[in-house]
Image: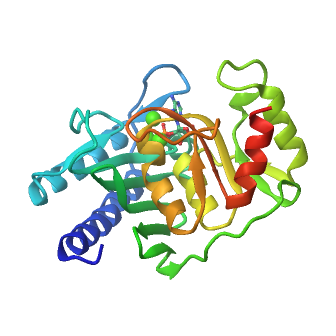
Amino acid sequence: MKNEKWITIEQAAKKWVLEAAKLLKDSFENTLTITYKSHIADLVTDMDKKVEQFFIQKIQESFPDHKVLGEEGYGDDVQSKSGVIWIIDPIDGTTNFVHQQSNFAISIGIYEDGVGILGIIFDVASGDFFFAKKGEGAFLNDVKLPMLENVALSEAVIGVNATWVGPNRRINHENVQSIVRKSRGTRSYGSAAIELAYVASGKIDAYLTMRLSPWDFAAGIILLNEVGGIATNADGKPIRLLEQNSILASKPGLHGEMLDHLLK
Ligand code: 2AM
Ligand code: CA
Ligand code: CA
Ligand code: CA
């Protein structure tokens, strides 16, 4: 992917992410307008909408033939994987953005005909800039990330949130319980994009979650691909790019060990 076209797209995407991050940081000075989407825990702010619209305007100006799929719905009604598609989460971790002003990210995955080419996850408050380009590797703040090496579950730190607790129609909670018990520890950061970036950079060893949308995982799975990580559904099946998916993202051998628990 060394061709001119993708160098231009990469430079534009990185520049716009830094500009959007400035909008978010500057917004800390102002009062946020917060509303609910599906329920009281499903927050959206004026900044989620503003940042998504910022990207769409930039993309339409510079790349009118590209499509955009964004969480807040200002992009295109994307039904097919053909062409270049920017899959954008303007703020991943809106609850953290509202409650903590940290641990939230801008996440952008750019695909061509369904193949992930560029992934960016920018943890705005910490300044950690995760980037990947197909065939060229994944980077944290311009330092190339090493390939992931296997680790046993007993020595692994697993990213998992508490939604699996108790009866859950999406997963057998006893199977997750056995993973949690056998692991060295669990973490929950409240941003799927950051958690996927942490798997790619080895800060955690795996991430398991029950239902994510394309904008939550689009960038993260591109990062993972570049470092030899594995990302599938929680039942081991391939992720469907334009649909909601459960996600098991992990170091290579650990992925199989966790699947053994999940498929019991
Ligand atoms: P979001 O902040 O962009 O909505 C923890 O809540 C993680 O799950 C975040 O990455 C969040 O993304 C994502 N998530 C996906 N669907 C969600 C929902 N309906 N409510 C809250 N968070 C959701
Ligand atoms: Ca949301
Ligand atoms: Ca999200
Ligand atoms: Ca979001």
Give the camera-side residue of 187 and 43. 187
From the top left corner, tell me how far across and down residue 78 is, in percent: 25, 36
Where 9 sits versus 215, above or below?
Answer: below
Q: Quadrant of the N terminus?
A: bottom left
Colour convention of the picture:
rainbow
Residue 259: image x %, image y %? 73, 42
235 left or right of 30 in image:
right
- Left or right: residue 165 compared with residue 232: right
Q: Residue at x 45, y 59 (%)?
A: 222
Most foreground residue, 121 or 1:
1
In percent of width and height, residue 2 lies at: 28, 78
Residue drawn at x 54%, y 61% as measured from the top left: 224
Vertical relation: 101 (above or below) 48: below
Q: Is residue 82 left or right of residue 107?
A: left
Which residue lies at the image location 70% right of the left edge and 20% below the top edge?
A: 168
Front in this rendered view, residue 250 or 191: 250
Horizontal and vertical percent for residue 97? Answer: 51, 46
Q: Residue at the location (71% across, 70% down)?
A: 149
- Compared with 236, 228 (above or below) is below
| Image quadrant in which the C terminus is located | top right
Q: Is residue 204 left or right of residue 98?
A: right
How many numbered marks are there? 0
